[in-house]
Amino acid sequence: MELMGSTLTATYARPKTSHFLPAISTMASSYRSTQPALAISPSANLWRTSSYYKSSSGVPGPSSIQRDGLDLVRAKTMFYPSNRSALTTRYTPDDWYKSNHNNYRESESSRKSAERLRKDTIRLMQDKEQLTRRSQESTSKNIGERLNDIVFWRSELSHETDNMVTEIAALTEVKRRLERALAETEGPLQVSQECLYHREKRMSIDLVHDNVEKDLIKEVEVIKSCQERMRRHLDRAVAQLASNRAAQHELERDMSDKVTAQRIDDRCHHLRNTSDGIGYYRGIDRLDPSLSVPDSWSKFTDDNILLSQSQRAASHKLRDEIEILLNTTSNEMWNQFSNVNVAFSNRISETADAKNSLQTHLAKTLQEIFQTEMLIESLKKALRDKECPLKVAQTRLEERTRRPNIELCRDNPHHRLVVEVREIEDTIHKLQERLMEAENTLQALVKTKIALEHDLSIKANSLFLDQEKCMSIRKSFPSMPRLVGFT
């Protein structure tokens, strides 16, 4: 806020006479302290204090009129600090206009917010009404579909209950064959595990997880999987007769529950907004964790029907399953047995090839070691041959330092001797570096030779294990008729 009515500099009206001096009373009155409150003047200048407009008590003369005019000029242009403080609380016209505009904007914003809220609320009510209607229609449709599902499963249960029979006459022979086939799988399993045990004796880098080991592990898994399926079917055959009445009881109980559920859902399906008996039930929409889901509900009935069908057609269905199982398991074991034998043959071939390559590389490495040793001897001889030329050059330089007085000159022979010494020293340095490289190379070749020899022994051990140990015991694998339960 700016201070109204104040100026930075004051303007004084000086009279035309040069000998003018204001009266002592007038100067004293101009320095009197004013009151803090502002006196309201009858003039239009309401904000000015009355102290500037007090008239003199004496009779005005020409000089007093001039002094009064000077006082009025000073009153218009200057204020004391006490009078200025009363003006600092005022607002400017800009503040007034800004306040009005702010009020306009706030009013317009409030109106727009209220209008937007009204429109959004009307739209919300319409949307929620449509949503409620669609939700109720969807729920009625879902209940109708649920009724169809209940009717379908109820008819299936009724049909299966009516057709329930006990038939286990031919299961004994199939069960006996399954037991013999299960006993025959112990031999192949032992062979596979023994092959894995022998191959654990491979050494160093040959102890790899190769295709042979993968196929052997897979063969063990296949045999164990076949055994597990055989045991599962064997348990089913043993428990067939005892499970017959239990399955029938589950079917009857499930059908009774579905009759009750159908009656309740049918009543719910016909309920409308105008129906009798509708009311509020607070908290009924909370989920009960003990309730089933559609998947578990249908699976429960389907399991009961499947169990009933297996009981009803045990003599035929279970026999067929066991026959299929025996053929499938025997084919799986024989196919995996053949895969393992092929992997063994390939691995033995690869190991033999690697062994031959190692022998070839070992021979080449021995030849290179011999040549490197000859190179080292040649480098040492070259270093010995550079000793005498270096001694000659350095001796010449030393002798030429004894030349007297002015004869001790840095002539061309001197410069050439210095160059010669440096060249020979550089040659020796390079030959020494090359000698060091040759010795390092020789050590690397020796290490390579040792590694090749060690790897050759490893390959020989691997060949012995795969070719002699493993392949010899795999010849005792049982035949196909024995794997399917025939003697």
Image (tube, rainbow, N blue to C red):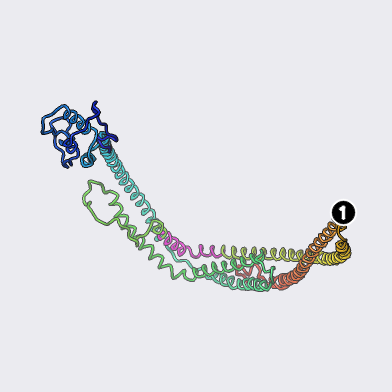
Indicate left or right for 182 with 395 as reference: left
In this view of the protein, which residue sits in the foreground, 276 or 260? 276
* The quarter of the displayed image where residue 394 is located: bottom right
Residue 36 within the segment the image draws in magenta: no
x 32%, y 60%: residue: 288
Quadrant of the image containing the N terminus? top left
Q: Which residue is mark 1?
A: 412
x 67%, y 71%: residue: 199
Q: Main secondary structure of the magenta part?
A: helix
Quadrant of the image containing the C terminus? bottom right
Residue extent of the magenta highlight:
300-323
Q: Position of residue 324 (x, y in %)?
A: 57, 62
Q: Position of residue 174 (x, y in %)?
A: 55, 68
* Secondary-structure class at tag 1: helix
In this view of the protein, which residue sits in the foreground, 445 or 460? 445
Q: Is residue 302 above or below residue 92?
A: below
